[in-house]
Amino acid sequence: MEKTAVKNTNRKSPVLDFVTKWGTLLTIVAMIVLFSVTMPTFMTGANMVTIIRAVCIVTIIATGMTLSLSVNGMDLSVGSTATFANTVCMTFFVWYHMGATVGGTFLAIFLTIIICLVIAVINSFLIVKLKIPDMLAALSTMFMFEGVAMTYAGGGAINENMRRPDGTTATGKVPAFFRLIGKEPWIIIVMLVLVFLVFLFLTYTKHGRYMYAAGDNPEAARLSGINVNKYRALAYFMCTVLASIGGIMIGARVGNAQINSGSSYLMGAVAAAHIGMSVAGVGKPNALGTLAGAILIGVLENGLIMASVPYYAVNIFKGAVLAIALALNYVRKK
């Protein structure tokens, strides 16, 4: 009798269960309906493309954040990693003329990712070896590489025909081929491919399952023979690669490197990755949920801007959406 009473007490309301599972998707639909009714131009094909294009870079960076969350960490250095990658890649083109050929363009992209892995090495050393809490370690590398990017660039933007820190004029050009991948449909294709690959990795490979196990219960995973430290380090390396690609795509999108260009994507990446945990009641970091979270933020931001809400007030609504998504996720866990 007592067991039955306890069971009935802990039973969730079907309505609450449905809302916690599908609240994110319902919110997206509700916002699209609301904005479409109040602003007829919102639902046009051109604006839908604008929204998808706008969320591409933040989705790529947030997908990297998802990998760090899978091992119960949080890489707050993803914004600085994107800034650093953006700066390094642009200097390869503008300072060192590596964009003269398609092969040179791909080499510049490859070298940028390799150089950015230094951030993953430092994060892994601080977190895995020195046992510094993930957020604190990543916070230190965030500030460090913001400074490294600014120092390397001489404290300014990287543009064609700029004056270099040594006083000479840069004569290199950003290749047209590189700029092409920053436009639709290519930027959208790159985003979808990366999200799908991470989804397959986390869901259908043993390494992805080991990463989840290392995040859920490190001690149990260790006793099961899983090298927890190895998979935590792997998560940070993969996160850095995706954040670097995000930074490279910023350069492809705008054709230059601005000071702290990737930092503005940090909040959106954190929000998208955490919102994604509540999608479909999964309750854990997942790439498809992250994509849904990024779309939710993109729809919200686009609608608010079209409604003439001041840009400095948009973060109020984004923060509120994140708080609600986290509440739904943690209510479901109780």
Image: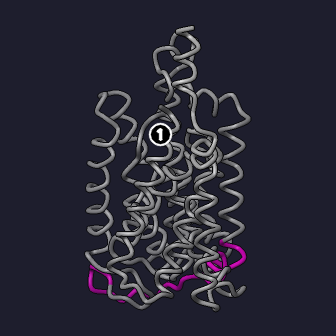
Check residue 182 for magenta coloring: yes
State whether residue 152 is above or below residue 271: below
Residue tagged 1: 331
- The answer to which quarter of the image holds residue 128 is top left
Q: Residue at x 59, y 54 (%)?
A: 23
In the displayed structure image, the side of residue 283 where residue 154 appears, left or right? left
Q: Is residue 168 above or below residue 5?
A: below
Residue at 54% across, 82% down:
174
Compare residues 159 and 314 and report the one nearer the observer.
Answer: 314
Which quarter of the image is occupied by the N terminus?
A: top right
User: From the viewer's perspective, is 119 left or right of 32?
Assistant: left
Kind of element beneath mark 1: helix
Q: Residues within 10 Å of mark 1 (few under 14, many from 20)?
A: few
Residue depicted at 57% across the width and 34% down the height: 12
Applied colour scheme: one colour
Looking at the image, the residue that sits furthest to the front is: 1
Residue in view at x 40 percent, y 47 percent: 75
> Magenta span has 68?
no
Q: In the rendered view, does 260 fall on the left or right side of 58?
A: left
State which region is magenta: 164-187
Q: Is residue 281 above or below residue 166?
A: above
Q: Main secondary structure of the magenta part?
A: loop
Q: Residue 298 at what x, y percent from top left? A: 54, 71
Count the numbered circles shown: 1
Q: Which residue type does callout 1 highlight?
A: Val
